[in-house]
């Protein structure tokens, strides 16, 4: 059977920052440390060993190298079917030009929304020469299109028989983004991995990769680390792990119009008009408010701090729904692997009574495998 050095978990959930980890831990009910190795699961499933529905671990650090090391260790320890990378990220907002004015689009991911990556780009492996910047590549595994289609896409819109994933969000939704939505939405699209926080809209390198990867909708610092670890894990025909990348938007990354500099950036922490799309004139040199107003750094920090509690709460709720879906079907037995039961919530389907409503795997029944 599938077994790592510490056992087997069908899903490894990998979080990076402390507040991401804590929010996901609360949502999953991960209150039991397995084998004193930093991996957490739910108390009521520990008796299901050697197969656990999930374990939650925290990355050794941010950026490619620490996340790659953590993902590789998770594979060695738990031999998961799926690695689920979760965390907060920047949502890309792009400007469009009309009659000399630029409108910041509001049809993409905004703070509090969820991004599920269907492709990840690495923006930092480049050759820089006088004629321009050229990308270079190394092999990675992309997120599973099957998992995206089967488990993320159905959550974009509510259905009649299952409550929406955001129904369990506890945090109050901030109202400060001028074009934020009333409810969080799920977006599926391309992610750009970078090795630095994308916080300066006037930074040349930042604007280069936002322009080059013109279909990307989010920016993170860990996805390629997991993508490379999955590629390196393919050492025999008997193990075929896959992965998903789930990000909750905590702040915005502004992609300026190509060839235009000095376009002002919407004030994200003070614009309380809930319906207006910020419009700015071409050629405006200042970024931020009026003289004496907080600097753009202050505004970015304030907006991020305001939205992060809601973003990580949304992340936890969405992560739980994804994990529940991933373990809701049994793994078929094959040579050398007896397979596993499905789990309804964290409860083995074999132990759920016949009157348990089908499809309600979001509900914690409080039962224990025996």
Image (tube, helix red, strand yellow):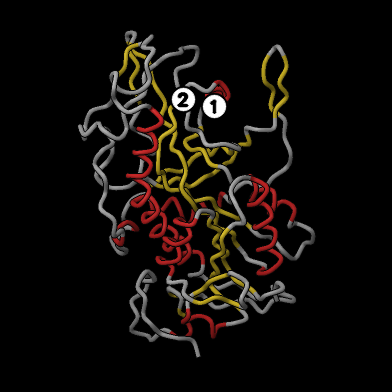
Percent of width and height locating residue 284: 36, 12
Label 1 Cα neighbours within 10 Å, binned few <14 / some 14-19 / many ≥20: many
Residue 114 in the figure: left or right of residue 329? left
Q: Residue furthest front?
A: 292
Give the residue at mark 1: 206
Q: Residue furthest right?
A: 236
Vertical placement of residue 5 versus 189, above or below: below
| Residue at image point 62% right, 78% down | 35
Vertical placement of residue 268 versus 54, above or below: above
Identify the image quadrant of residue 27: bottom left
Residue 194 in the figure: left or right of residue 298? right
Q: Quadrant of the N terminus?
A: bottom right
The span from disc 1 to disc 2 (Cα, nearest Å) is: 7 Å
Q: Is residue 159 visible?
A: no
Which mark is first along the chain, 2 or 1? 2
Identify the image quadrant of residue 276: top left
> SS of the residue at dot 2?
loop
Label 2 Cα neighbours within 10 Å, binned few <14 / some 14-19 / many ≥20: many
Which of the pair 198/113 is nearer the observer?
Answer: 198
Percent of width and height locating residue 323: 48, 64
Identify the image quadrant of residue 171: bottom left
> SS of the residue at dot 1?
helix
Give the residue at mark 2: 201
Q: Residue furthest bottom?
A: 370
Mark 1 and 2 residues: CB-CB less than 8 Å, in contact?
A: yes
Residue 237 in the figure: left or right of residue 252? right
Percent of width and height locating residue 301: 39, 38
Q: Is residue 367 visible?
A: yes
| Residue at image point 42% right, 26% down | 94
């Amino acid at each position: 059977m599938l077994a790592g050095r510490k056992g087997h978990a069908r899903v490894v959930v990998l979080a990076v920052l402390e507040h991401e980890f804590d929010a996901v831990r609360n949502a999953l009910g991960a209150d039991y440390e397995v084998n004193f190795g930093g991996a957490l699961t739910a108390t009521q499933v520990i008796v299901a060993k050697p197969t656990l529905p999930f374990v939650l671990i925290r990355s050794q650090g941010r950026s490619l190298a620490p996340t790659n090391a953590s993902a590789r260790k998770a594979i060695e320890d738990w031999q998961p079917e799926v690695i689920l990378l979760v965390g907060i990220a920047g949502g890309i907002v792009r400007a469009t030009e009309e009659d000399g004015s630029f409108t910041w689009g509001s049809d993409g991911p905004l703070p509090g929304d969820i991004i599920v990556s269907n492709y990840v780009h690495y923006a930092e492996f480049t050759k820089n020469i006088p004629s321009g910047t050229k990308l270079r590549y190394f092999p990675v595994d992309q997120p599973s299109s099957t998992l995206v289609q089967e488990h993320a896409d159905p959550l974009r819109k509510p259905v009649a028989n299952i409550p929406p994933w955001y129904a369990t969000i506890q945090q109050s939704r901030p109202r400060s983004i001028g074009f934020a939505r009333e409810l969080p939405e799920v977006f599926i699209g391309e992610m750009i991995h970078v090795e630095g926080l994308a916080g300066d809209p006037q930074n040349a390198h930042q604007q280069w990769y936002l322009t080059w990867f013109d279909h990307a909708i989010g920016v993170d610092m860990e996805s390629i680390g997991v993508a490379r670890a999955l590629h390196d894990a393919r050492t025999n025909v008997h193990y075929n792990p896959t992965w998903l990348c789930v990000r909750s938007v905590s702040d915005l990354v502004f992609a300026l119009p190509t060839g235009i500099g000095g376009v002002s950036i919407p004030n994200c922490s003070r614009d309380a008009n809930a319906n207006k799309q910020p419009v700015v004139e071409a050629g405006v040199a200042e970024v931020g408010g009026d003289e004496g107003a907080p600097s753009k750094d202050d505004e970015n920090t304030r907006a991020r701090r305001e939205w992060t509690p809601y973003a990580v709460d949304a992340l936890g709720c969405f992560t739980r729904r994804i994990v529940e879906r991933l373990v809701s079907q049994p793994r078929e037995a094959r040579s050398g692997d007896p397979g596993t039961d499905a789990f309804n919530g964290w409860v083995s389907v074999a132990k759920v009574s016949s009157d348990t409503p089908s499809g309600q795997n979001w509900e914690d029944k409080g039962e224990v495998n025996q």
